[in-house]
Image (cartoon, grey):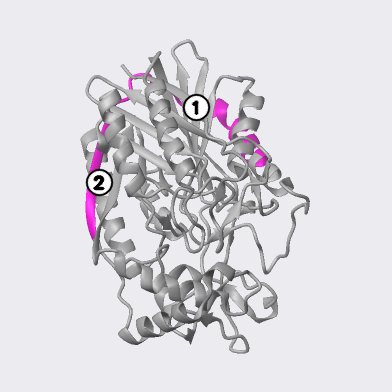
């Protein structure tokens, strides 16, 4: 038999808290809607798993590993059976240094305690459950933000001091666009969980879309992830169910269409609301088609995969030190014409403290006939679609168990573009994506073989 439970806890930061997700730090001056961490606990006769989705931009291993050890001590759930992921909303509390967005240590410490409390809460009051996998298509909110450009526009690479073949978000240069570089993954995949009494416990959904970000600079908001969760509960008519929207393979995907134009409302939060609620309505209309499993088996595979740091030339590093010495970083602003050069020069120097090789967590859960992969960074839609070829009822939860930044396909490094610029949010070797996918594909195949 399969048993489980779902729970949530409010993690809304106080006013004045540092906000992460842009090139410079922000401070919370307004709370538009609450932030949550939400958990799904499942167990069968042999295996216990815990999936937590947190309304936050990023969480790294230096935060997550000690937390997972404490969760294991309190609940007995093995560290490798815990998946803790960020939604990647960009208007939340900051617990990791990201570009010039700094850590709020008070919020970081408080969040760790709340996530531990959530984990303990989730294993209480377990009941017999049944699960079902579903998917719907929502391509209309997805746009590749990387564009091949005409020779008349030369995208500047602030790290290599060269021009790129690709421009990410080409504001003001729409006339020089040739084409987009990829096709998004249109699927909204989800796992439904009900009790034996047919009452909803929750839904874990997944969509390959970056945050929307349609709010004032100092605002705290869960973005479209929150609107999705609330609307779905309203449609189903269950105030007690726990709905989670996790971040899929969306490293190069957002809603800004530089070819077709902006088709969304312009007011604060209006785009987030429209998109989140539209996805919820699509999921809701598909619920009657679900096929439920009441005796689903659980399985987990986990591996720490060694990956190398991308190197930079001594000349670039020397130039970076010169810029650091000449820059007042306390006075840095978005209006600086050389903002990127200043920020990325600092990144080259700070990367010196990262080991030449790291351990990247690769994780795979089987829940009945469904498989969920966990990836600790921002992977492109192409990566997710390759993995889905291995299993029809599969999806990838990104920004899970770590955050190493962007992990583009190797060919994208020839094109360049923002996602490839070497920094602490994009520092792995150029073939890292291929190594990770090979590892996860092997895991998926093992899961499928064990099922038979």
Q: Position of residue 286 (x, y in %)?
A: 58, 32
Q: Earlier in the sequence, mark 1 or mark 2?
A: 1
- The span picked out in magenta is 277-306
Residue count near mark 1 (Cα–Cα under 10 Å), binned few <14, some 14–19, many ≥20: many
Residue 365 in sight here: no
Front in this rendered view, residue 92 or 225: 92
Snapshot quadrant of residue 52? top left
Residue count near mark 2 (Cα–Cα under 10 Å), binned few <14, some 14–19, many ≥20: many
Q: How many marks?
A: 2
Residue under the image location 51 percent in, 51 percent down: 208
Would you place residue 241 above or below residue 127 in this image?
below
State the residue position of label 1: 8
State the residue position of label 2: 443
Residue under the image location 70 percent in, 75 percent down: 172
Q: Nearer the viewer, mark 1 or mark 2?
A: 1
Would you place residue 287 above or below residue 68 in this image?
above
């Amino acid at each position: 038999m399969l048993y489980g439970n779902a729970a949530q806890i409010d993690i809304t930061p106080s006013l004045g808290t540092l906000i992460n997700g842009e090139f410079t730090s922000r401070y919370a001056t307004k709370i538009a809607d609450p932030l949550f961490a939400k958990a799904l606990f499942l167990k069968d006769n042999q295996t216990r798993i815990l999936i937590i989705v947190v309304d936050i931009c990023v969480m790294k291993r230096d935060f997550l590993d000690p937390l997972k050890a404490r969760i294991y001590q309190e609940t007995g759930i093995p560290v490798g059976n815990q998946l803790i992921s960020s939604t990647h909303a960009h208007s939340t509390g900051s617990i990791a240094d990201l570009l010039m967005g700094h850590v709020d240590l008070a919020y970081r410490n408080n969040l760790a305690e709340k996530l531990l409390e959530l984990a303990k809460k989730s294993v209480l009051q377990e009941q017999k459950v049944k699960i079902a996998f579903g998917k719907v298509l929502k391509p209309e909110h997805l746009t590749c933000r990387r564009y091949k450009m005409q020779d008349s526009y030369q995208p500047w690479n602030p790290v290599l001091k060269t021009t790129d073949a690709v421009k990410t978000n080409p504001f003001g240069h729409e006339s020089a666009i040739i084409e987009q570089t990829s096709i998004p993954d249109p699927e909204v995949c989800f796992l439904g969980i009900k009790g034996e009494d047919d009452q909803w416990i929750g839904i874990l959904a997944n969509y390959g879309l970056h945050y929307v970000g349609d709010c004032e600079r100092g605002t705290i908001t869960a973005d479209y992830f929150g609107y999705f969760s609330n609307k779905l509960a309203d449609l189903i008519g269950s105030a007690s169910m726990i709905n989670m929207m996790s971040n899929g393979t969306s490293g190069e995907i957002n809603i800004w269409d530089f070819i077709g134009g902006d088709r969304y409302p312009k007011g604060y939060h209006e785009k987030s609301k429209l998109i989140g609620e539209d996805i919820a309505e699509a999921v809701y209309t598909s619920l009657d088609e679900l096929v439920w499993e009441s005796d689903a088996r659980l399985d987990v595979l986990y591996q720490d995969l060694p990956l190398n740091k991308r190197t930079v030339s001594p000349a670039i590093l020397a130039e970076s030190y010169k810029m650091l010495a000449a820059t007042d970083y306390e006075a840095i602003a978005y209006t600086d014409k050389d903002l990127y050069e200043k920020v990325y020069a600092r990144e080259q120097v700070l990367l010196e403290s990262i080991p030449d090789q790291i351990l990247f967590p690769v994780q795979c859960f089987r829940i009945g006939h469904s498989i969920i992969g966990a990836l600790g960074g921002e992977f492109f839609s192409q990566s997710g679609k390759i993995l889905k070829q291995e299993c029809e009822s599969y999806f990838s939860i990104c920004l899970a168990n770590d955050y190493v930044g962007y992990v583009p396909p190797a060919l994208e490094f020839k094109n360049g573009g923002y996602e490839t610029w070497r920094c602490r949010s994009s520092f792995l070797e150029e073939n890292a994506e291929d190594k990770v996918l090979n590892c996860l594909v092997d895991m998926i195949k093992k899961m499928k073989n064990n099922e038979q």
